[in-house]
Amino acid sequence: MSGPSTLVLARAAVPTARAVRWAPGASLAILLLAVAALSRSTQRPADIVLAIAAASLAAAVVSGLHDPAAALLSAVPVSAMQRRMLRLALLGVPALTVWWLLEALTTATLSGPGPLLALTACGVAVALWAPPRRAVLLGASTPVALFVAHQAVPAGTVSDVVARWQSDPWWVLAGAILICVAGRHR
Amino acid sequence: MIPTRTATHTTSGTMLAADGITKRFGSVTAVDDVHLDLDGGIVGLLGPNGAGKTTLLRMLATVMAPDRGTLSLLGMDPASPAARTEVRRRLGYLPQSPRLYGGFTPLEMIDYVAVLKEHTDRSWRRREATAVLEAVGLGDRMHQRIRTLSGGMQQRVALASALIGAPDLLVLDEPATGLDPEQRIALRSVLAQTAHRGCVVLSTHNTAEVAALCQHVLVMDRGRICWSGTPAELAAEAAGRVWESDVEEPTAVRSWLTGPGSRRHVGALPAGATAASPTVDDGYLLVTRLAR
């Protein structure tokens, strides 16, 4: 009695990648790269561009968890969590590549993939614990909501807490991962 | 023919056992203190909408855990993650109204399900996927995109995905939905082959399907199993309590039109009426009404 082998997940990678809807994420990546290139050419501050990029890329990665055939696959030995992890791995590679390209194009103070990973992990944590029917929608909305809240909330304690994904992304990531681990059987 | 595998029966001989399983959603009790003990064959689950059939099947398919009570599937307790994975290796599940990947072909879809059922040998998967698609009558459509197939064909692709790997336990939620009469007959022979080596539990609204296919019937109402027996016994429940007439009968438990001016009734036979031959339909209507 053991979990699925690495070989099983490796075999599942290509069809899983085919099952993911890539077009929205690809369009978003092109748009973000174009905006980053524009801000570089006009020498405008790029911090906000990278913050928007972190939120929107994280939302795109989390929305990739949507699996139309989830009900049909709900009783296979490879668990829903393992299938989600596979999707996240597949979606994470291009998202990080886009992030690094954006960083290379801009000269923002926001550096490293921490904010992107922190927001993505927050989105995944919400998706795991939200009611199944709205899980991915709520999860994908979380990074955007955190970004908007950070912009909208006046400076103060609440704003500091909301902005943790930027100021202390690795702690936020660690916390979100713990929440994900607690919900691994969901 | 679907591929066969030597049945790996449990030491106890019981394929599926439930002891007082209960599932609640908020204030609604979807499944209420259900006890089951099934050895094999085809078991039909009948019941009105909202009776709890889908919730019960989801628990039997390890998709959902009961809030109370214990389950034993293929001799294992699916509450333990390791045992649940092992059960799933020998389980086929068709949910209600399943969705598929429209961009895949049926062959790719079944191959993907086979991978997720931990079959890593590519040639084996190809052979089995072809066999199950032929068994459900999609041999000539296996390379066509799923989004171009009709609803009935998509339902058969989903059924094929449940059949891949010759499961010992097959849990099917309304498998005949969207199938035409010819396809329904084909479905019966496919399920009969699976039942030969294991256990098939299916829900349906079609009593004719149950009469033709199932060795055992469970009738559910309001989350409980209100009747259990063979299709013949279910029909016999209405023996001497079915009659036909041209007028409404106030004493009947249930009445329905069977043609212009002709009505069929179940209930206490009135004086002077001649009892009609009972069907599974009659028995089902009677037991669900009497359970209320």
Image (cartoon, coloured by chain):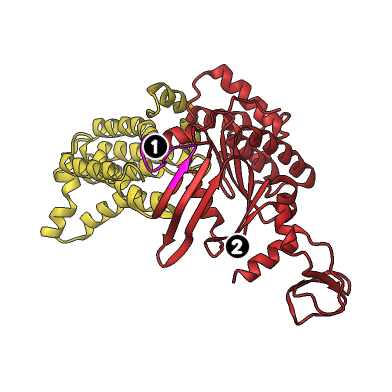
Chain colours: A yellow, B red
Q: Residue at x 27, y 44 (%)?
A: A182
Quarter of the image for residue B239 reads bottom right
Depth check, front residue: B279 or A21: B279
Q: Quadrant of residue A45?
A: top left
The structure residue drawn at horizontal position 70% and vertical position 49%, both measured from the top left corner, is: B178
Mark 1 nearby-residue class (10 Å; few <14, some 14–19, many ≥20): few
Residue B76 appears anywhere in the view: yes
Q: Nearer the viewer, mark 1 or mark 2?
A: 2
Q: Which mark is residue A30?
A: 1
Q: Position of residue B264 (x, y in %)?
A: 81, 70
Which amino acid type is marked by label 2? Answer: Asn
List the residue tagged with mark 2. B49
Kindly identify which chain the residue marked by label 2 belongs to. Answer: B
Q: Is residue A97 magenta?
A: no
* Residue A82 in sight here: no
Image height check: is B69 above or below B284?
A: above
Secondary structure, mark 2, is: loop
Across and down, in percent, residue A126 comes to 31, 50
Q: Residue at x 16, y 48 (%)?
A: A164
Q: Which residues are magenta?
A: B71-82
Chain hosting mark 1: A
Q: Quick one: quadrant of the N terminus of chain A?
A: top left
Label 1: which secondary element: helix
Above or below, A17 against B258 in this view is: above
Residue B76 is one of the magenta-drawn residues: yes
Q: Position of residue B77 (x, y in %)?
A: 41, 41
